[in-house]
Image (cartoon, rainbow, N blue to C red):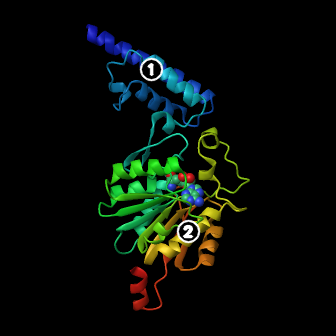
Amino acid sequence: MSPADVSAADVRTRLRTALAATTARLGEAGVPSPSADARRLLSAAARTDRPLVLLDELPDDFEDGLEALVARRAEREPLQLILGRAPFRHLELEVRPGVFIPRPETELAVDLLREHAIGELRTVVDLCSGSGALGAAVLDEYPDARVLAVEIDEAAAELTAVNLDAAGPGRGQVLHGDLMTELPELAAARPVDAVLSNPPYIPPEAIPRDPEVIAHDPHRALFGGGEDGLEVPRAVLAWAARLLRPGGVLVMEHADVQGPAARDAALAQGGFEQVMTLPDLTGRDRFLLARRTPGESPAEDERLSR
Ligand SMILES: C[S@@+](CC[C@H](N)C(=O)[O-])C[C@H]1O[C@@H](n2cnc3c(N)ncnc32)[C@H](O)[C@@H]1O
């Protein structure tokens, strides 16, 4: 074997050994997807996006770097926080400690928007924006759209701005504020074509068990307030009814047991038609869809659209 062949064989042995040991260690720590996470951590330690099998060299500090990353994951720190980014639709979003990590199931909200929106999608509001995931996806996928995002937490509002700016420079705006209060700048945005929201909605007694969630997602991002967890979602409904043009749609995520309660809340709010619950890809009821009712007359529609 040539020296190059020896070195490539040595790299493969180091990778195989590291992958087996890391997968076993993460499995023992209770990580739900130890093999997939191990591969991502090996790639990070190797500082590469290339498939591991194609690597023929590794940084000198590969083993030390990997140990530092694996120790964090074995403590159940979320993989996305360790890597500093999270995939969301076609984007790689920046994530930061203390800000809710975007979840894959939320990605479906943008498909539902695409499916149910009627007419132009030029102005979209993302309520409870967190990292800005939904708004950033809209900017990325609708090059003519502008997004106004609202977020109560200062660090999250800053991260929303970063991710919106990366996805659609100059087309995103962030309002740092509490939806449970009057927000004149938000009210001034009406009429808008769509409202997207993944608000906090967990009821107080349904405490998440995964350490990744309960120790790392901010509690204000999880618990929706009130006995049913729907206090912030009700504020989202009230804002959507105020902001949407006639025919505009709201897509709001909720827990799988909250379909009927979310529909009731939308009907009690008023101003919506075609109020329905839509499932996620596993068939669980996860989204409320509601369309702003048209006005009583074309003249009123015109007024509401102004
Ligand atoms: C479940 S996280 C969702 C974040 C993002 N939309 C996503 O899907 O990844 C909910 C977000 O709502 C924010 N939030 C909670 N209460 C709020 C309120 N009253 N007004 C505005 N934002 C709020 C939290 O700070 C958190 O960032």
Question: Is 44 left, or right, of 103 in this rendering?
Answer: left
The part of the image, by quadrant, that contains residue 44 is: top left
When the figure is inspected, residue 31 is found, relative to residue 13, above or below; the finding is: below
Tell me if 4 is positioned left or right of 146 in this view. left
In percent of width and height, residue 124 lies at 41, 65
Quadrant of ligand 1: it is: bottom right
Q: Which of 20 and 276 is in front in this view?
A: 276
* Foreground pick, 304 / 118: 304
Label 1 packing within 10 angstroms: few (<14), some (14-19), many (20+)? some
Question: Which of the image's four quarters has the N terminus?
Answer: top left
Give the label on residue 184, or none: none
Helix, strand or loop status at disc 1: helix
**Residue 78 pos. (x, y %):** 55, 37
Write down the residue under mark 1: 16
The amino acid type found where label 1 is placed reads Arg
**Height in image: 113 above or below 79?**
below
Image position of 242 with respect to 134: above or below: below
Identity of the residue drawn at 41% across and 28% down: 43
Which residue corresponds to mark 2?
182
Taking the image as shown, residue 22 lies to the left or right of residue 139, namely right
Front: mark 2 or 1: 2
Disc 2, ligand 1: is the CB inside 8 Å?
no
Label 2's element?
loop
Q: Which residue is drawn at 41% across and 85% down?
A: 303
Q: What residue type is labelled 2?
A: Glu
